[in-house]
Structures are given as C-alpha cells and as structure tokens.
Image (cartoon, coloured by chain):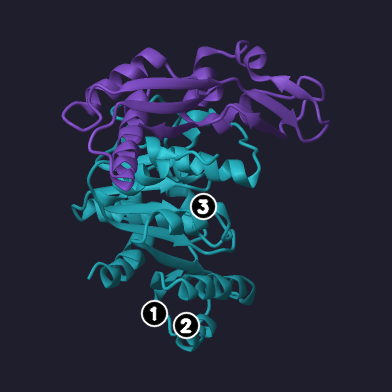
Amino acid sequence: MHEWALADAIVNSSLKLAKDKGLPKVNEIFIRIGEVNNIDIDAFNFALSEIMKGTILENSKIIFNEIQANLKCNNCGFIFNYKNEFDRLSEDEKESIHFIPETVHIYIRCPNCGSVDFDFIEGRGIFLEDIK
Amino acid sequence: MNFLDPRVDYIKKRFEKIDRVIGVSSAKGGVGKTTISVFTSLLLKQKGYKTGLLDLDIYGPSTHIILGVKNRKLKENFGVEPLDIDNLKFFSSIFFTDNKPFPMRGNELSDAILEILTIVNWDELNFLIIDMPPGFGEPTLDLLRLTKKIEFLIITNPSIISLETVKKLIQILNEGKYKILGVIENMKSTEDDLIIKSCEELKIDYLGSIPYFYDIETIFGNVDTMIESNVSLYLDKILNKILI
C-alpha cells in the first residue's frame, strides 16, 4: 500500500490551499477517491491523521467522496463496470493497478470486443475537493 | 468544478531533494539514449554521487535489459523505494507491468507519469538521470511543467535524419529557455563533421562523440564490465565536461 505517500500529498495540497484561502485553522477536508485507485480507506485515514498532527489540519474531519468507476470502449462504444472486471484479477495484478491505475490496460479488456482501448468515464484519481 | 490534483505539488516537493535532473533526450528513436542513460548513471554512481535512473520510456522500457534487472517487488516507504543496484537507485514501469505491453492514450500516459513521479520515493540524490522516450510528447512536456531544474543531454547519430529531429527539440527547449547541457554524437563511424558544424550553427555545446561499438550488447547485464568498457571510457570524458 502506498497510502502514506498519497496522504502526504493531500496534506501538502491542503496546507497550500489553506494558505491561499487565508484559513488559520481547517476543520473539514473533502477528498474525492476514484474506485480504480483501490485505496484502503482505513489505512489512508490513519496516515492522514498522523501526518496532519502538529499542523493547522490536526483533528480535521475527513469526508471521503468515493466515485464508482465506469469505462467506455473507444473501439466499440461499450460502457462497462470496472469492478466486475477488476474482481477477476489476481492479487498481483490488482496491486499493479493500485500503484499505477493506467495498468488496467494491461490486465483488463473490453468485455464486448476485447479491445485494450478504453477510457475512464469516471472513477480515476484522488483529488482534494475542498477544505473548510 | 475543478478539484486539486495533489500529485503536482507533491512531485515538485520530491524534486526539491534532487540536486540535478538530467533528461537524456533525442526526439528520434534508435540513437542510443537508453544505453547512454544507463552508462551515465553507472559512471556517476561510480564517482560516488548519489544517483538515480528513471526509465520514462513507458511504451518501450529497456533500461532494465541493459542493467540485467528482472521484475521484482519494490519496498514501500512513503510510496515505493526504487530498486537498489549496488548503490544505483533504479525505477522502471516494468515493476508494475510484468513486462507486458502497456497500451494507452496520451492523456493516460500523462497520468501514469504523474503517478510514477508521485509514488517513487528517491529521497536525496545528487543526480536523477531520466531515459526519455523519443519525441516531445507527454513525458517531455510533463517534466518541463513539473521541474524547472531539468537539464537536457541531447543524443544524436551522425545522420541528417536524426539531426533534423534533434534540431526541432533544441528549438523547443531554447524557446522555453531550458538548460541544454550539449549534444553527444553517438555511434560515430566516420570523420564527418556534420554534427559539430550543426552545433556551432545552433550555438549548442558539442560534448564529444562515442564510436559505434558493434558488440556492445554482449556486455549488457554485467554492470562491472560495462563500467570498465570502452563506451564508459569515451562517455567519462564527456561527463567530466558537464559535471563542472
């Protein structure tokens, strides 16, 4: 799991945003998490809490907005659910996607035509939505 | 609504710990960028510098072949730690692709590069050598966006075909006022001075040439032999010019 690096990145961006907004203290952090990133929410939450200690983010409430992933084939136009395909993969393949989500193109094919050429409609990436 | 991508600032933070970032580029394929990237990183490591080698040629990674590295699991520590090869830190996408084809469109290539630069924990380095893919697409543009400290080592063959593309790369880098360390003429087999004269016209440093070694692949995978090889002998003289 590389949740610590991602948590460190979120804390880094939150502190920068707080500075830009002129906030002396942050109480809520809104984080968008795409399903493809396959994040362990508990581990991520723990890492965030630890890294936020001693900063203006300490004790903030973290609100996760988890986004289901859907894919669209560029070859045949078929729209398919990511989880159905992901669940069929081996643990090593799942771990590769966890680290570099674009590796889905190595391990998943369009269930309709078998193409490797599909896009994420939604559900990829981790973003800082807002802080309050 | 636009959300903040935390990777961008985090990557900048990662680069802050690296003294010099050198992209080994050509814009043209097949001129020896990968070979020179690997030998450069080995020679810098041999001189005692903390050195990393990053393979950003994600569609066709091959630095691992020259180094003789097989796929393996990386240790995790605030991301993933690059593989340690006798004090050379090394990362390639092959660690997550099982050395299978990795097809994707340009916007996804950009995302994959950002992900790699976010998760790989180089820690402190004197040099990060980046084996760049041919062309000036996502990998080049993303690096220009993410670190102002990148310097370019440009590789060409003694060929008008290679030179023509290299000129375009130099034009782009000059327009952006990016640092170009100079040009290495690789696989030189005649006394032709085409590249030397072109460098004079372009006002770019001609760093030197490396002859064509037809049997170079026989030493791939043997790091000690590579460091002692004739390629290293020629490259070492060139590197001394850019280490100042």
| Mark nearer the N terminus (3 vs 1) | 3
Dot 3: element: helix
Q: Which amino acid type is shown beneath numbered disc 1?
A: Asp
Q: CA distance from mark 3 to mark 1?
A: 24 Å
Where in the figure is residue B13, as x and y percent of width and height? 30, 46
Where in the figure is residue B207, as x and y percent of width and height? 37, 75
User: In this rendering, is residue B86 above or below A83?
Assistant: below
User: In this rendering, is residue B79 above or below A39?
Assistant: below
| Mark nearer the N terminus (2 vs 3) | 3
Please say whether residue B158 is visible from this viewpoint: no
Q: Chain of mark 1?
A: B
Q: Which mark is residue B205?
A: 1
Dot 1: element: loop
User: In this rendering, is residue A77 above or below B170?
Assistant: above
**Chain B hue?**
cyan
Dot 3 and dot 1 residues touching (CB under 8 Å): no
Residue at 57% from the left image edge and 58% from the top image edge:
B134
Quadrant of res B67: top left
User: In this rendering, is residue B122 above or below B81?
Assistant: below
Q: CA distance from mark 1 to mark 2?
A: 6 Å
User: Which corner quadrant holds the C terminus of chain B?
Assistant: bottom left
Q: Which amino acid type is shown beneath numbered disc 3?
A: Pro
